[in-house]
Amino acid sequence: MHYVITDYGIAYLFGKSIRERALALIEVAHPRWREELLKAAKKFGYVRANQYLASQVAYSVDEERIVTLKNGAEVRVRPARASDAGALQALFHRLSEDDVYRRFFRRVRSLSYQQLQTLCNVNHESDVAFLAVTGPRENEEIIGSACYWLSPTTNLAEVALMVSPTFQKAGLGTALQAYLQEYAMSRNVRGFVFEILPHNVSMLRVAARVQGTITTSRDDDVVHVTALFPDTGNPSRSPLPDIQDPPAGAA
Amino acid sequence: MKTRKTHPVNEFKVVDEHGKEYTVFEYQEGIEKTSLKWIKAGPTWFRLSDGTDIDKIDDNTFNIPMIDRVLHRQP
């Protein structure tokens, strides 16, 4: 069996692990049965004992988007699913050590399953994750990840991106950020917060392209960028914030 | 509320005056945010791969206090 189609989405099964298949099938089941199916899958050892499903709604095909990059490549941006963990780990392992340090602010050799779930198993309301993918739907390669986590107290969302080295400098980060902003604005999020290492100039540029009012501050280790979205439907692009020059010796 | 943890946040090579190479781990107390970003929230210290604590003299120079051996960071 290659795939299963329900009212709640398509589960691509061919070539996937048992865990990925079980999760993919549960994710396209009627929400009423998902908890029960998840419980049964745990009982049979098909999924981990601490597996959860953050989203209880149907996979939203309407949120899929085709994006054309500066190099002419067309990539699909789509909501992340819990069953994307394996492909997300593959993206992580394609990143250089420096990319990993810039994303996680420390050396990380591998992401734990729990960490991967943080990046793809989200409720799409307060925690949001989109993936940029290439290849056929049944065998996608994840080339980018864009997430935000909304603070209920400030109504500001912290943003984090990962882009595969082969698609860096192609405008994918900017495209993902723009899509995240569109999604966030449609949900009345007040703005984005970015925490960026001072020498991560490309990410500083991505943050500077958020439409709205941008303020930056810097402590010893991190540049904090706050971007407040415009109130009206006619946003004006704010000027670029001060991007710090790379410190001597920085990559 | 996130709890503070200690993690190795960096790893690099140093050499002594005889050219012997050591691996240094930089440990830091901090908080892992929901975004998985590591935010420093406490002291930093350095340790060789065999567990020996070393002192930082400057960004590129370290010292093994037990034997008073100076180590230089490799470019």
Image (cartoon, coloured by chain):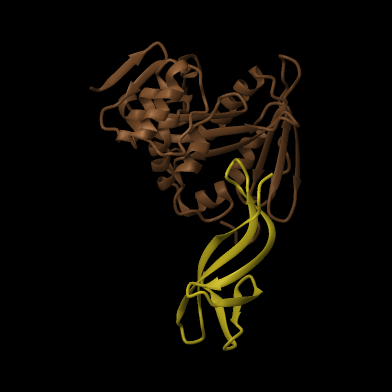
Q: Colour of chain A?
A: brown
Give percent across and percent down for residue B13: 49, 71
Q: Is residue B37 rendered to the left or right of residue A236?
A: left
| Picture quadrant where residue A109 is located | bottom left
What residue appears at the point 74 percent right and 22 percent down from the top-left corner?
Answer: A230
Q: Is residue A10 rendered to the left or right of residue A52?
A: left
Residue A2 in sight in this render: yes
Above or below for A236 versus B1: above
Q: Nearer the viewer, residue A213 or B54?
A: B54
Above or below for B65 versus A44: below
Above or below for B74 versus A31: below
Q: Colour of chain B?
A: yellow
| Picture quadrant where residue A132 is located | top left
What residue appears at the point 38 percent right and 38 percent down from the top-left corner?
Answer: A86
What residue appears at the point 40 percent right and 31 percent down from the top-left corner?
Answer: A83
| Picture quadrant where residue B36 is located | top right
Question: Which residue is farthest left?
Answer: A1
Give percent across and percent down for residue A48: 40, 39
What residue appears at the point 37 percent right and 28 percent down from the top-left corner?
Answer: A40
